[in-house]
Image (tube, coloured by chain):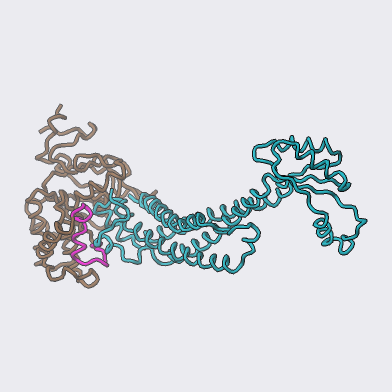
Chain colours: A cyan, B brown
Amino acid sequence: MKNPLFVTDAEQRLIPSGGIRGPVPVLIAIMTFVMVVVAAAGLALANTSAVVKSGVEHRYSIQIADGAAKAPAAMAAARAQPGVVRIAQVPPEDLRRTLERWLGPAGQEADLPLPAIIDLDIRPGADSAAVGRAIEQAVPGARFVSHRTSLEPLLKALRGLTLLALGLVLLIALASAAAVVLAARGALDTHRGTIEVMHGIGATDDQVARLFVRQIAIDALLGGVAGAAAAGLIIALILGGASTATMLAGTPPIGWNDVLWLVTLPLAIALLATQVARSALLRALRERL
Amino acid sequence: MPHPDHGEGSAFLTGTIVEFDTVGLRYGTGAEVLCDLDFRLSEGSFYFLTGPSGAGKTSLLKLLYLAQRPTRGRMTLFGEELSHAPRDAMPAYRRRIGVVFQDFRLIRHLSAFDNVALPLRISGHGDEEIEGPVREMLAWVGLADRASARPPTLSGGEQQRVAIARAVIARPELIIADEPTGNVDAAMAERILHLLTAMNRLGTTVIVATHDVGLIAATPGAQLIRLEKGVLVDPTGALKHPPGTARRSSEAP
């Protein structure tokens, strides 16, 4: 079987260039634009989620509600545990400043009882539950809290949004494929006379399909590249103009690896369109004798 | 000469290019347009298919050029039973048949040259193999100077000649022509008939559907296939048991 994308000049003349063109390149461009933007958003969310997660993965806090008096004992107990690599008590001034946001000037009053909060990092692989149990036993009333547990609702939301973006990308791909199927069937109807003559003379389905597949591959590639270029411009403008995401995550939300993924999307769309068009054409041709 | 009995399973005969065994054809749920067709066509013979309008000539031609499958019976072409042959097998058989359609079915946006070259291109011939034979064929049908013209700019007669050139260019084993002289003057009709008889002398089996009695009279040795209301009229049985056919030696009883 010949390469489905190889068509001689004489074969090209069989189906004038209006073969599949029409709205297909524009449609593919729009679909690719939306797909790249959504995929970029999904990747940015996934990256942010990863950065937030790695920042709190091994961080814990000891909270002692009834005061600073127990803080030294708690710190001593923590220090004695294997796997604890960093211990730091949150300064009372910081706590008062935080409370001031909620309570106003009353937050700075000296007689306002403050909890003691001690942050600690535990080495990856260490038994954090054992550390927590030991501290809670040594200092009654102390609570050992995982930062990750506190941030779990946020991480869960980020994961959900990332999956939503992935789902949208797949849906857009599916919609593009459906549009290509319709366009391919429309092209077959437009050129029904030529196809009947070719079949009558002994052309195989592959020979007929090849005439259309090449055209749709070119259309899909042109549309895909145009859509991706427009999306890339928009993404660059957004990332260049707003550093909120960067500040939130501490790193750029989209790295070079992600850019590579995004660049492959128009190629993937072109490949998908070509394959789907070929299958649709062959299926439609098989409906005839 | 022994002939297989009707109920024997229609062993294909050497020298037979087409064999119909109780073939029937209906479109959808309508009545049968062809009924119990039982005949054999000899290789290298010349046949005229005649009958009044609506007799089923076009339907029979569609069966012969593999645009339709019979709804019942067995249809054997080139020694292969094709009534239930897989669809993928059809192109190879269609390439052995040249068809002149009554409505020409030329591809409007292709030049006369490209239309005539189409069967060769579909068979995989390269441009360098195509150029000479196609020019020669166009010259033969008197269209050498119209090679680059497109069908809409050609007269009916010119289109018919392009259609004939396209049907014979690949030297098919079987030529099927539906009213091939319907749109040409007497001189061109004679020329077309001459081309078809020349192809026939080279061993090609020719089937021409026509109402033109003059054409039939001008072709001595040609046999008649007459249809009436979808039924074959064969009072002598010559079409069912044609002379000059014999069982393959391996199938001899």
Task: Say above or below: A9 vs A283.
Answer: below
Residue, far top: B253
Position in image of residue A186 (x %, y %): 40, 61
* Left or right relative to A174: residue A75: right
Task: Say above or below: B230 vs A73.
Answer: below
* Residue A168 located within the stretch drawn in magenta: no
- Residue A79 sits in which quadrant? top right
Per the rendered image, the range of residues in magenta is B104-125
- Residue B22 sits in which quadrant? top left
Residue, far bottom: B153
Position in image of residue A237 (x %, y %): 55, 68
B11 or B122, nearer to the observer:
B122
Asked whether the viewer can see residue B191, the reply is: yes
- Residue B106 sits in which quadrant? bottom left
* Left or right relative to A175: residue B177: left
Position in image of residue A44 (x %, y %): 58, 57
* Left or right relative to B35: residue A77: right
Residue, far right: A111
B163 or B231, nearer to the observer:
B163
Which residue occupies 78% across, 52% down? A90
